[in-house]
Each structure stands twice: as structure tokens, then as C-alpha cells.
Image (tube, helix red, strand yellow):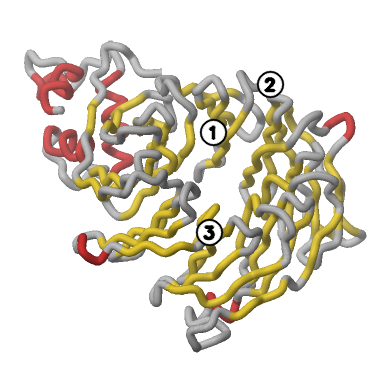
Amino acid sequence: MADPEVPVATEKPVKVYKGDGASLNNLFFTANYIFSGSQEDGKLRVLHKTKDDEARQYDVALKGLYHFNNVLVVVRSDHQMALWSISEKRERARLEGHEKWITSVVFLENGHMLSASADNTLRLWDISSVTQSGQGPNPGLQSKKLASTAVFKGHKDTVTALVLCAGDIFSGSADNTVRRWNTAGRLVETMEGTTGHTNWVLAMATDSKKHVVSTSRDQTMKIWAIKKKRMGGRKPSKCLATVELDGAPHLMRMNERNEIFVATSSNIITSYSLAGKKLHTFEGHTGKIRSMIFKEAALYTASSDRTLRKWSARTGRVFATYQGHEKGVNSAQIEGGSLYSVSDDGDVCQWSLRDVEDKLAWYSSDSNKTDKDNLSEMEWYSQKGKQNKKNQQLASRDAASALAWYC
């Protein structure tokens, strides 16, 4: 939580790409273009970063947006998926097979993609012909239909989440279970019973090698130790820890240090270790937290309270609040030196990532500092009782007031 004596920078967008009022939910970037999707009107919008007259929109019945290599995966409202060539900005293949809405998509290393659905199944797709060339299986204008190569059956209710760990696939479901599958679609293990969840599994995360984390409507988080396949088969996964949460979880992410960040209905984020130990709390948002992304030692969040915030992921201290949207912020992404966000107001906002860090670097006469160095220095400034060489440079101005003066 932010120390009330520590200044918090309030940042304004450096550019606003005005929309037509339809809520925007998804973001993706190339060198010159911004792709944003609206679940409200089902359209994919393509904006040029510098040429406003090149803005385009396509009616694709959009309900979700993913990307892999040079392809966009558009999840459609008709339970299909479309593979879009980013360079050509048009559909190259259509994936048909699911009978209800698609909830999650993950990509495998061998050019395959896995999708989860409310029809209780997972489906495996070979999309290598599109992702490797970007031209798709059909070089003409007509989009080609692709069928799934395998169907994973076993869940008894909506499949809500997917992750890959230890060479296998893990799925969470509204049937209260986490299930483990091999890449051929064989059910290997069901994590339930006395160590399992007692309500819907809502989200999952993984370190990709040894652990899977699941959150549930039962307001718990479970951390599972995953055993790799050995001679004689796989050993059962073990629940290492069950953590009681402060509300219903709706978003979970894991950073490069394998720390777990969970946002709940209390509008608070809490971070945990893989042992289940509580690390830090991030308090300040007054609405639902809809997005979490990491850059070096910083955590960026977007909320329905119309703001984004920048925090130290290592202390829970807030450094900046980004204000400019007129309605709730749905998603954020970092690209280059900028933070981009989309909102229910239909706009895309671009923010400078370096505003606070550059002021610190300039102030300390070291413009070569990395983001991580600058964040560490900001934390140093905000701690009371540290009087050393920094105070000699500051003379009569203490560190906190100097930071406030420059911001």
C-alpha cells in the first residue's frame, strides 16, 4: 500500500485514438498498427500509429482476440475461430467444431493450438500451415475451413481455463475439477476430492515446469506440485497449499519471479509465493481490476474505476496513476516505451512509460539506469529514516519532496 507521505505521479495520455463509442476489450500490436477488438459490436479495429486516415474496422463477430507469431486468432460469437493474417489484414482459415462459446486458447510449440469451450471439451488444432507462412492453406481470397485433430472429453461442465506444464495440458472447469491430459488427448489425472476445489475453477497459472495454480469460486487458491512423466508413468500431483482469499477471485497472473498475483472482488490484489506465503497487498483501485501486466519490477493494472496504476511488484507501493479514460478500462498492453489501454469509452489511450523513471534518472544524473534500477531508487526515496549520500546531494530538500517537485 502506498505511504501517504510518498508522492504519486498522476499521468495523462500522450495520445488518444478516438473510437466510435463501442466498448473495446482486446489489444495487440505490430510495428505500425494497433489491433483492438470490441465484444459489444463484434468488430476488429485496425489503427495506424501515426496515420489517422488509415483506420479500418472489420465485422468479424468478435468475442475474443489472441495472437501467435504472425497470426491473429479471432474468437467468434458463433463458436468458431478465425485465423487472420496480420500482414494482409484478412481471414485465412476458419476453425469449426465447438458447439458452445470458446472460453480459452493456448498455443503449443509444434504449431498446434488448443481451445476450451462451454461444450465441456477441449479441441486440438493444427494451425502450422497458417502460422509458418502467414499465407494460410489457401492462397486465394476464400478462407479455408479447418477441423480439429483431436477432441478431449471428460469434463462435465464448462471448461474455464487452460495452461501447459511439464509437457502436459491442464484444464480447469465449472465441474470443480482440474484435469491433466497428454498432448494426444488422453486423460491422465483428475485433481479433485479432499484436496480439490468445492466450486467452479475460474483461473489457472503456471511456472511451466513444476507448479500449477488454480483459483475458484470457493474463494480459495490451490498450488499444485506437478510430477513429470517417468519410467512407470506419472506420479499424482500434490496440493502443496490451499490459500483462503479475501473475496471471489476474477483475475490471476504470475510474474517472471514465479510470484502469484490474485485480484478479487474486494478490488485488492495480493501476491503470494509458490509456497502459498502472502507477500504484498496492492490497494487503491475502487473498481474491478480487469488487467495485470508486468515490466521488470513494475506491475501495471487497469480497472473499471477508469484508471490504470503502476506499482512496485516487490513492495505493493503505488508510483503512478494514469487518468484519461471516461469509462472503465478493460485491458492494457506494453509496446516499446509506451503503455496502451482500451476502455468501455471506445478509445485507445497511449501513455509514456518513462515519465516517472526519466525524472528520477535526470535528477540522479544517471540517464543509463534501467527501469529496474529506477524503480529500486524510487523505493529507496520512499523509505523514511535513510540518511546517506542522497541527502548530501539533496541538501536541504528531502528525497520525498524532491521527487514531488520534479513530478
Viewer can see residue 165? no
Viewer can see residue 197? yes
Residue topped by disc 1: 261
Are there few (<14), some (14-19), or many (20+) residues within 10 Å of tag 2?
Answer: few
User: What residue occupies the far right of the structure in this picture?
Assistant: 232
Residue topped by disc 2: 244
Type of amino acid under label 1: Phe
Image quarter hosting the N terminus: top left
Type of amino acid under label 2: Glu
Relative to 27, is 107 on the left or the right?
right
The residue shown at (73%, 29%) is 241
Q: Which mark is residue 61?
A: 3
The residue shown at (79%, 49%) is 227
Of residues 175 and 133, the one drawn nearer to the viewer in this rendering: 175
Q: Is residue 307 above or below residue 286?
A: below
Type of amino acid under label 3: Ala
Separation of marks 2 and 3 at Cα, in angstroms: 39 Å
Separation of marks 2 and 1 at Cα, in angstroms: 14 Å
Secondary structure beneath disc 1?
Answer: strand
Separation of marks 3 and 1 at Cα, in angstroms: 32 Å
